[in-house]
Amino acid sequence: MAEWVLDVEQIRQLLPHRYPFLLVDRILELEPGKRAVGLKNVTANESFFEGHFPIKSIMPGVLIVEAMAQVGGVMVMTMPEIYGKGKGILLAGLDDVRFRRPVVPGDTLISEVEMLWMRREVGRVRAVARVNGEIVAQAEMSFAILDPERFLSPPPPFLSAESPNQQERVSTVPEP
C-alpha cells in the first residue's frame, strides 16, 4: 500500500465537507495546483446505499463526481496563494462526464485530478476515477475560488437564531 500524503483529518482542515459528505479518505499524491490522487474506501455502511439501490448497492454517479471534485479541491486549496487565506472552492460546471461501470461496496475508488488551467479565481481540471486500475468515471470540471465573505456568508434571516422556532413555522404552512 502506498504511503499517503494527507490523512482524513488533514483533508478536513482543507475542505468544509463532513460525514456523510466527505468522500475522500486519503490523498496519496499531491502537487499543489498541478495534480492530486485521492482514495475513497467504499463500504457497505455508506448511508446512500440504503436507497441506491436496496437490492443491488451502487454508488450514485453524482457522488463519484463529488469524490473527484473533492480531490481537486484539496489540490487547489493547498496552493500557496490560497492555503490559509480562508477562501473556499465551489464546483462551477461539468463537461464530458462519463460513467463506465458501477462502483459497489468493497471497491477502492482512486480519483486522479489534473489542473488544465487556472486564471485568477476560476479554473478547470480533468478528473478520472478508477477501481482496480479500470476507469469507472471521468469528467472535466470548472471551479471558482471564493473570498471568505462570499463563501462564509451569514445565514438568511429566516434561519437566524432570532427567527421563530423552525417547528412552529412548519406547522403553520397552509395545506393545499
Image (tube, rainbow, N blue to C red):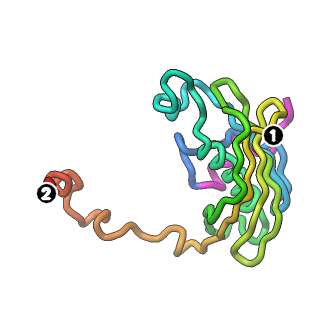
C-alpha distance separating marks 2 and 1: 54 Å
Pointer 2 residue: 174
**Given contact means CB atoms under 8 Å apart, are the residues at marks 2 and 1 in contact?**
no
| x 19%, y 61%: residue | 164
| x 55%, y 31%: residue | 46
Number of other residues with Cα within 10 Å of mark 1, as a class: few under 14, some 14 to 19, many 20 or more: some
**Residue 78 at x, y percent in the picture:** 75, 60
**Residue 108 at x, y percent in the picture:** 73, 31
Image quadrant assignment for residue 155:
bottom left
| x 74%, y 69%: residue | 123
In the image, residue 149 sits, relative to residue 2, either above or below, namely below
Give the magenta range.
1-15
Question: At numbered mark 2, what does the secondary structure look like: helix, strand or loop?
Answer: loop
Q: Which of the labelled discs sits on residue 59, or is there none?
A: none
Is residue 13 one of those drawn in magenta? Answer: yes
Is residue 37 one of those drawn in magenta? Answer: no
**Residue 151 at x, y percent in the picture:** 54, 69
The residue nearer to you, when weighing 12 against 109, is 109
Pointer 1 residue: 4
Number of other residues with Cα within 10 Å of mark 2, as a class: few under 14, some 14 to 19, many 20 or more: few
The residue nearer to you, when weighing 129 against 33, is 129
Viewer-nearest of labels 2 and 1?
2
In the image, residue 37 sits, relative to residue 145, either above or below, namely above
